[in-house]
Image (cartoon, rainbow, N blue to C red):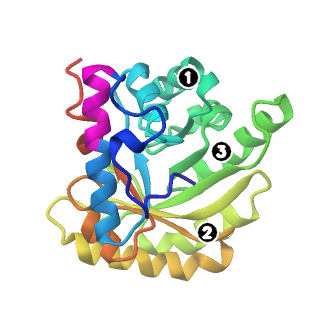
Amino acid sequence: MTEQTSEHRAPDELPGGSTDLGPRGQEIARNLARVRQRIAVAGGADLLPITKFHVAEDLRVLTRLGVTAVGENREQEARDKHAQLAETGLQFHMVGQVQTKKANSVARWAAAVHTVDSLKLLNALDRGAGLALERGDRDSALPVLLQFSADGDPQRGGAVEADIDQLADTAAEAANLELRGLMTVPPLGADPAAVFARGRQLVERISDRVLGAPVYSAGMSGDLEIAIAEGSTLVRVGTDIMGARPVL
């Protein structure tokens, strides 16, 4: 679903190099190289840079550094960037909560949705992806990940463990969706290793309904090493690549 990071390369060996990127581009290149190195040392995983609030030009730099997909949290922002960067071929993954009323829009531009946590949202995305296919806005089904909530806090999104199997059944049977795996974020104050380990068990439990090799999206800037040790196959890193979010 995203770039492979099992082999680390220095910034000046990446596509486009780093010397002609300008100060901001060189900063991103250095940060990206450090994160790729961390992932490689931890055992390897795919990388999804998270680019919420960062300008389209920063994302253009990422494409020059070999990045083929990024994650965004807000529908309108992601839609706008997708349009601005259409010529680059950069893919946009939705990693924020999706309002049901925006499912049709998300299904038009998203390369994948990582935050499916209800039957209502599943059905809305299925309908939206079907419409997008009919209109030529998509050329294939929409890949989705189920979001596992370890504490059931509705403010943070995610489905509790008891609901994961039903969601997996429904996603696997949807005409216009592809179930690809599971995503989780440890609650504040929780033991991240325990949460990641439980998520890994859930991935294995639903693997018979997943298309292809199951994707386990777990780990961010501060805990990616722990996540990889517990079986993560994809880490989502924002601050350690892009720097602090701009003040709006």
Q: Which residue of the protein is positioned furthest toward the left in this rendering?
A: 189
Q: Which residue of the protein is positioned furthest toward the right in this rendering?
A: 134
The picture places residue 11, in percent across and down from the top left corner, at 34, 42
Mark closer to the chain start, 2 or 3: 3
Residue type, label 1: Leu
Q: Nearer the viewer, residue 87 or 188?
A: 87
Residue drawn at x 14%, y 63% as measured from the top left: 189
Is 25 colored magenta in this rendering? yes
Identify the disc placed on residue 49. none
Q: Which residue is mark 1?
A: 85
Mark 3 secondary-structure assignment: helix
- Apparent side of residue 14 relative to residue 226 in the rendered image (left or right): right
Q: Is residue 98 above or below residue 227?
A: above
Identify the disc placed on residue 125. 3
Mark 2 secondary-structure assignment: helix
Mark closer to the chain start, 2 or 1: 1
